[in-house]
Image: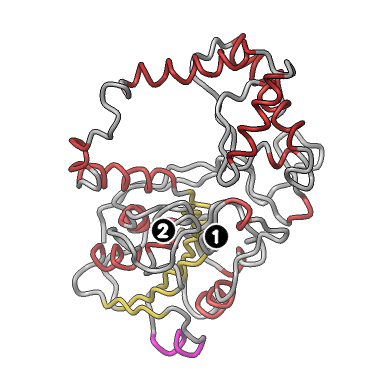
Amino acid sequence: MHSNRGLITDFLKNTLRFRGFVISDWEGIDRMTTPPKANYTWSILTGVSAGIDMIMIPYNYTDFIDGLTFLVKKDFIPMTRINDAVKRILRVKFVMGLFEHPLADLSMKKYLGSQEHRELAREAVRKSLVLLKNGKYANQPLLPLPKKAPKILVAGIHANNIGYQCGGWTIEWQGLSGNSTAGTTILSAIKSTVDPGTEVIYQENPSSGFVKSNKFSYAIVVVGEHPYAETFGDSLNLTIPEPGPSIISSVCGGVKCVVVLISGRPVVIQPYVPKVDALVAAWLPGTEGQGVADVLFGDYGFVGKLPHTWFKTVDQLPMNVGNSHYDPLYPFGFGLTTVPSKAT
């Protein structure tokens, strides 16, 4: 895209009349060649000529300035292209009032993390959850779960971890593990939702013997991916890391269970589907874990639909609706629904 004049200039700027300015990605023009910066003069010329107005240079910005200056002085890049970029950048800054008020307006800071915003985030969580399976048999649904039960088990390393719920690009670039920011874990949400007389036992990775010997009414298993961002999340197998699969096997082999999957994308789940009674794709719900409990226990119904085809195996990828080999585990737009129930 950094070299695509047809889309950046011809379509975005000329056809769509885009009045803003285009910014490169981090080291974007460097990586137009392999290896990066192998022909930096060509990269500058091609990127700026394509219509990029502002270049993101994290390190050696003087190399870029020198290279661009050379290309302009030698008439490889016309001054009209420079003027267009400058005009676009200044226009946005004038419209924003940055010259009159260059510093951030902190008057709205008090609303960050407000209860009203958290309620909206909680609503977004419960509406985005996708119910993939509900009961070993269609006429015997497991969800919604009863709030009144003698004893229930909550398991999985994602059950009490806001960092895992949030994923990457949050408190830090690659995300964090643990409760590093204000919010509600799925475990605490479960505890606050069930009947006061219900005993909630939490173990990250319980043994199958522990599960079978404790006479749990049911179990909620919360597992999934670790946080990642950008290329650190690249995967050729798209599998759930251990101990996630082991926890599913040990828990769901001994008691009725619902698995809540925390992930930034579809991952390999086909081997586990027969073992579980119910399966929920929770994506990265963020800080408001109460939204998960809202639908698990029937205060609200499941309404979410898959925004992406869910594959059976990675060998099928890439796979999209309309492909001749389209044979998904769950098709694009799939999502079971439940009816809200106040019954306990």
Q: Is residue 247 above or below residue 79?
A: below
Q: Which residue is mark 2?
A: 143
Please tell me in which quadrant of the rendered image residue 268 appears.
Answer: bottom right
Please indicate whether residue 330 sits to the left or right of residue 37 in the image: left
N-term mark: 1 or 2: 1
Please indicate whether residue 74 sits to the left or right of residue 129 in the image: right
Secondary structure at badge 1 equals loop
* Residue 215 colored in magenta in the image: no
Q: Position of residue 328 (x, y in %)?
A: 70, 48
Colouring style: secondary structure
Is disc 1 surrounded by few (<14), some (14 to 19) or many (20+) residues within 10 Å?
few
Q: CA distance from mark 1 to mark 2?
A: 12 Å
Quadrant holding the C terminus: bottom left
Please tell me in which quadrant of the rendered image residue 198 appears.
Answer: bottom left
SS assignment for the magenta stretch, majority? helix
Amino acid under disc 1: Tyr
Q: Residue at x 27, y 35 (%)?
A: 104
Q: Residue at x 36, y 78 (%)?
A: 202
Amino acid under disc 2: Leu
Q: Of 60 and 255, which appears nearest the observer?
A: 60
- Residues in magenta? 208-214
Q: Residue at x 32, y 54 (%)?
A: 288
Q: Position of residue 273 (x, y in %)?
A: 60, 63
Residue 137: which disc? 1
